[in-house]
Amino acid sequence: MAQKPSIPKGTRDFNPSEIAKRNYIFDIIKKNFQTYGFQPIETPSFENSDTLLGKYGEEGDRLIFKILNSGDFIRKVDDATYADKNSATIAPRITEKALRYDLTVPFARYVVMHQNDIDFPFKRYQIQPVWRADRPQKGRFREFFQCDADVVGSDSLLQEVELIQLYDAVFSELKLEGATIKMNNRKILAGIAEVIGAKDLLIDFTVALDKLDKIGEDGVKKEMLAKGISEEAIEKASPLFLPQGSNEEQLQRLDALLKNSEEGRKGLEELRFILETIAVLGLQSANLSIDVTLARGLNYYTGAIFEVAAPEGVKMGSIGGGGRYDDLTGIFGLKNVSGVGISFGLDRIYLVLEDLGLFPEAIDQSLQVLCVNFGDKEAMAALKLVSQLRKSGVKADIYPSSAKMQKQMKYANNRNVPYVVLIGEQELDENSFVVKNMKEGTQEKYSLNKVLDFVNYLS
């Protein structure tokens, strides 16, 4: 018996309609990237393991797909190591490469390797798939596309302002009104950890805090305790668990909480500058909101942190995120190069647009005109017409065989073809063709000598 085909969990096949919808999102994102002056690059789908490991925190490292070395890789493991059955010691012997987890760390590697060919500040965009060994669920896949825009070589906060505007421009063009761009600052989180006496446990503190919307206040407190953060420190951080309130209310609360932290106050100043600048410039359709619990557990963020939530009422995780990283390239030997970037979660944006019915009606219309095939002579005339239509940019085709009319019309309906062309014996004699409007059920006759009349009608 033949093996039943399957695909790995967390991956998907895409049909023509889904591809058309994805390309619609890609095109809008790419157009706005270019409008804002970003340039495209691409990096390999896999990197050396040491490029990726240690850059995303302990949890991130566990989600990296490692690639086994080619050949008889197990021979390189000595008997003692093999008998120990410790994956942490065996892995470096049998795998030297891994699928990329995101586009930011490979971008940092790219900048270091190509620094002599880059004009700084360097604004790049990148649209490529990434892989994570995550637990698959709605909106979360093991293989998915990221659409990133980053600026390196400038520590100006105007870059953060511009990236917020970029988010707003893309979501507005997608008609995804009411998306909320949540913002925090890593310096604020460091300041909070300092004033509550948990400075040495900053990463544990932020990783736990970042889960507030998933596991709730009790869950976060329990995880913090498990990581060694004292009950007294957690109690001092209790204002973070209160209802958020307006941006101004949160700024006032942070003012009081961070009065004795220099780093925390610096983060607060940065936050205030961005908010005040955006208030002057305005946004088209998105909301900008402070979220003091936003931590984004990636270790490389040092300043502003962003996360985008879908419009209210849509059950979906974040549809975008990013932040400032002051020395990410330093891990590869290039010090003091500040960067900031954002990412669009294509797959989740797709699901949100689908849920809200925001895709254009004709988006998956892969064919505008289908010519019915009535036989050899008629087909030849139809082929000539199809050629003319294609040269004019019309998506046109002819049914490949003279099957029953019912079968050909069913095919046209299934393909969502708006216009069907009929060239039968009578049309051949009259040197004409009949166009059937499939939506309205009407018919119109055109001369084969004046095909442009039909093309003009289509446009």
Image (cartoon, grey):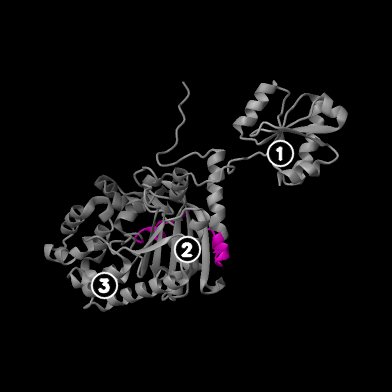
The residue to which callout 2 is attached is 107
Horizontal side, residue 79 vs residue 38: left or right: left
The residue to which callout 1 is attached is 396
- Disc 2 marks a residue whose amino acid type is Phe
- Mark 3 to mark 2: distance in Å? 37 Å
Q: Secondary structure at mark 3?
A: helix
N-term mark: 1 or 3: 3
- Mark 1 to mark 2: distance in Å? 41 Å
Which of the 4 image quarters holds residue 424?
A: top right
Q: Which residues are magenta?
A: 32-55
Please check the rendered image and state whether residue 48 is part of the magenta-colored stretch, yes or no: yes
Horizontal side, residue 8 vs residue 200: left or right: right
346 shown above or below 280: above
Using the image, tell me which numbered label, if any, was put on residue 138: none
Of circles 1 and 2, the one toward us is 1
Q: Secondary structure at mark 2?
A: helix
Of circles 3 and 2, the one toward us is 3
Q: Which residue appears at 57% of the width and 53% of the height?
A: 27
